[in-house]
């Protein structure tokens, strides 16, 4: 079976898309927050690879096209931001303060927990970019000696958790302003969380898109500083 995966250029892509479609179907049918399409797809693909005893590297070779599309897909998030640019100009100070707080808070929480649990420097830098988009997080992790595959996994898990709990948390803490919601979601759970922000409203989606980009830039600049903490 693994030989088939290696020889087939599109079978891995096919099962990935099918698994995601199953996730979308379950989400629409149940409306349950934990039925996140990406989460369902990840679980189904892991189960299939385990049952068929297929190495991850063999599966990965067939999904390179999805990785290639990741960066342009992230750039496309600028479209909703452009449509709400008047709000960005009006609330620029608050927006910038919110994104900076989110980015610094994310990295600081990793630093504190890594210190408390006595993680190695390698594991520390692996987890540090957990709240930024995968396209940036992979490069940073690799440059500073992190384990890229674990970084990708942590980023995806962070995004899924943000997608699932974003709306309940906003209700719990009585966060009603759409700009505040968008900035909080985007700066903490990147593109996957932004999907939820877009479901909540156009303003939330636009601000979350902005937060992804700015958080990524801030993280790139702050990473060398946080890298020296542990």
Image (tube, rainbow, N blue to C red):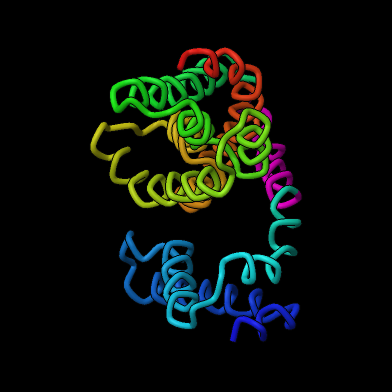
Give the percent coordinates (x, y) of residue 59.
62, 71
The answer to whether 179 appears left or right of 92 in the picture is left
The answer to whether 50 appears left or right of 206 in the picture is left
Q: Residue at x 49, y 50 (%)?
A: 153
Q: Residue at x 29, y 22 (%)?
A: 116
Report which quarter residue 112 is drawn in: top left
Task: Relative to 126, say whether 44 is above or below.
Answer: below
Quadrant of the drawing holding the N terminus: bottom right
Give the percent coordinates (x, y) of residue 181.
43, 35
Magenta-drawn stretch contains 128 = no
Residue 50 visible to the viewer: yes
Q: Nearer the viewer, residue 192 or 198?
A: 192
Q: Residue at x 65, y 24 (%)?
A: 220
Q: Which residues are magenta?
A: 72-88
Report which quarter residue 5 is drawn in: bottom right
Report which quarter residue 225 is drawn in: top right
Q: Residue at x 66, y 83 (%)?
A: 3
Give the percent coordinates (x, y) of residue 43.
41, 68
Q: Nearer the viewer, residue 92 or 52?
A: 52
Task: Relative to 137, say whether 218 is above or below.
Answer: above
């Amino acid at each position: 079976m693994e030989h088939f995966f290696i020889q087939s250029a599109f079978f891995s892509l096919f099962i990935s898309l099918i698994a995601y479609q199953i996730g979308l179907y379950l989400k629409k049918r149940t409306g349950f927050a934990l039925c996140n399409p990406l989460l369902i797809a990840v679980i189904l693909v892991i189960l299939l690879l385990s049952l068929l005893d297929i190495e991850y590297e063999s599966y990965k070779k067939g999904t390179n096209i999805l990785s290639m599309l990741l960066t342009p897909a992230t750039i496309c998030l600028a479209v909703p931001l452009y449509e709400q640019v008047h709000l960005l100009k009006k609330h620029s100070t608050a927006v910038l303060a919110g994104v900076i707080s989110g980015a610094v808070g994310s990295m600081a929480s990793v630093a504190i927990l890594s210190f408390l649990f006595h993680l190695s420097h390698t594991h520390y830098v692996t987890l540090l970019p957990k709240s930024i988009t995968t396209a940036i997080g992979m490069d940073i992790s690799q440059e500073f000696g992190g384990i890229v595959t674990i970084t990708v996994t942590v980023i995806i898990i962070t995004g899924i958790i943000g997608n699932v709990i974003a709306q309940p948390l906003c209700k719990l803490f009585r966060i009603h302003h759409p700009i505040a919601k968008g900035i909080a979601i985007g700066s903490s759970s990147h593109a996957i969380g932004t999907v939820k922000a877009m479901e909540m409203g156009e303003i939330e989606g636009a601000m979350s898109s902005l937060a992804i980009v700015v958080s990524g830039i801030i993280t790139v600049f702050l990473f060398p500083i946080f890298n020296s903490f542990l």
